[in-house]
Amino acid sequence: MKVTVVGAGAVGATCADNIARKELCDELVMLDIKEGVTEGKAIDMMQSSVWLGSDTRITGSTNDYTKTAGSDLVVVTSGIPRKPGMSREELVGINANIVKDVTKKILEQSPNAIFIIISNPMDSMAYLTLKANGLPKHRVIGMGGALDSSRFRYYLSQALHCSSHDLNADVIGGHGDTTMIPLTRLATYNSIPVSEILEPAALDKVAADTRVGGATLTKLIGTSAWYAPGAACAMMAESVLRDEKKMIPCSVYLEGEYGQKDICLGVPVVLGRKGWESIYQLKLDDAEKDAFAKSAEKVRSVNASLKF
């Protein structure tokens, strides 16, 4: 197996490091436009593998796409990150051109690659990747739901004073502060609905904290987070490369599911060797259906500015 990570900033490098530590592939290539960055980080990671026990071969390249040839999976993190006070949607103008150029060049070298899109605004960048390149829908996967769900479980674990590993709690909808939908009604703690344990006000606070989870970190750190995004991406890559069939909330192309068409939005999907393989249709209540429809409207308003 061969994996390419485009963009060797904090998110891309952390994602690459997690993939290499798990030995999900034989070869991992990092690509970036900044001279020497990927080469240096690749050497640093390879030196760390002496003690970690990983045998994944990691190489870096400055904008040489021929090095990525034959990749099975490509992670795209390219683009500018959020700064304090910025929304993900504000990045669309700059990042759209970058993502379109990157994915086109990748496909010239790896025509059968599966894409995991991290670049923001993520739902729109996944949609752009699909439409601009005429790809089969199953080969484009947006990461947002996996990351948002990790934040949801974190805030729930803090409220419940429990291990996050004992929680099942997912976020669907768009990957944005005003578009994501933490499913508090369906969240469970070892099969017990959390709504039976936490008061409505506490659940509302968890949902609100989840929605601004990224903005909270951006304000504290000064830029977008990277540890949780890197871990979420590696988990998704593992399910694809090892054909694990994990069900993970991801942004994928909808053709009538959840009442939406011609849009990429976060829904529970099964990830396997062919990319995303199926969508699970949750039984949403009226309020959740309404929230999902409103989320779709907001994502479409961003998509309207895209040029294929």
Image (spheres, helix red, strand yellow):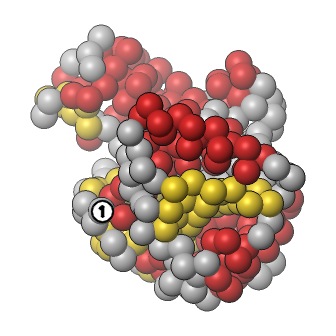
Q: Nearer the viewer, residue 290 or 253?
A: 253
Quadrant, the C terminus = bottom right
Comparing 11 with 69, the one in front is: 69
Nearer to the camera, 196 or 190: 190
Q: Quadrant of residue 109?
A: bottom right
Can residue 98 be spotted in the picture?
yes
In the picture as drawn, the residue positioned furthest to the left comes out as 191
| Quadrant of image for the N terminus | bottom left
Is 170 displayed left or right of 191 in the figure?
right
Q: What secondary structure is found at the residue carrying circle 1?
A: loop
Left or right: residue 266 compared with residue 96 = left
Give the residue type that dot 1 points to.
Arg
Residue positioned 31% across, 25% down in the render: 164
Q: Position of residue 84 (x, y in %)?
A: 80, 29
- In the rendered image, residue 276, in percent from the top left (x then y), is placed at 38, 70
Residue matched to label 1: 242
Q: Position of residue 89 (x, y in %)?
A: 74, 51
Q: Foreground residue, 234 or 266? A: 234
